[in-house]
Image (cartoon, helix red, strand yellow):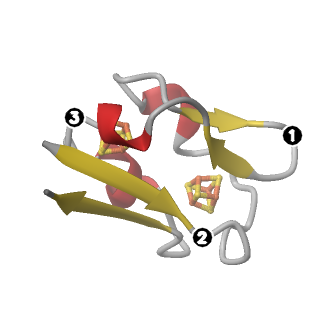
Amino acid sequence: MYMVSLDEEACTGCNSCADGCPAGILTFDGEKASIKGDPCDCMGCEACTTVCPSGAITVMEL
Ligand code: SF4
Ligand code: SF4
């Protein structure tokens, strides 16, 4: 089981992460990314952490 967290202060709004999330729990509102729904729905694929240039996303294995 995995959980994702997102530091919205660190997010630079590049919009690289949201579309690539296979769990559909990352969203982008035009300025910042955020988590919608249950952060524990994260599948742990690390696609978001790989593309994020600011280190704003953390994936933890629970
Ligand atoms: S690790 Fe994968 S499933 Fe989890 S939030 Fe990032 S892109 Fe989505
Ligand atoms: S990839 Fe990182 S910096 Fe870019 S929108 Fe997502 S969280 Fe923000």
Front one among 9 and 18: 9
Around disc 3, counting alpha carbons within 10 Å, would you say few (fewer than 14), some (14 to 19), or many (20 or more)? Answer: some
- Mark 3 CB near ligand 1 (8 Å cut): yes
- CA–CA distance between discs 1 and 2? 16 Å
Query: What residue is drawn where x is 56% and y is 35%?
Result: 18
Q: In this view, does 21 lie above or below 44?
A: above
Around disc 2, counting alpha carbons within 10 Å, would you say few (fewer than 14), some (14 to 19), or many (20 or more)? Answer: few
Residue 31: x and y in percent read 86, 50
- Mark 2 CB near ligand 2 (8 Å cut): no
Q: Which residue position holds label 3?
A: 43
User: Of discs 1 and 2, which sits in the foreground?
Assistant: 2
Residue 14: x and y in percent read 70, 54
Q: Which residue position holds label 1?
A: 30
Q: Which amino acid type is marked by label 2?
A: Asp
Q: In which quarter of the image is the C terminus?
A: bottom left
Query: What residue is drawn where x is 40% and y is 49%?
Result: 48
Q: Which mark is residue 6?
A: none
Q: Which amino acid type is marked by label 1?
A: Gly
* Sequence-first disc among 1 and 2: 2
Q: Which residue position holds label 2?
A: 7
Q: In which quarter of the image is residue 61?
A: bottom left
Query: What residue is drawn where x is 52% and y is 43%?
Result: 17
* Sequence-first disc among 3 and 2: 2
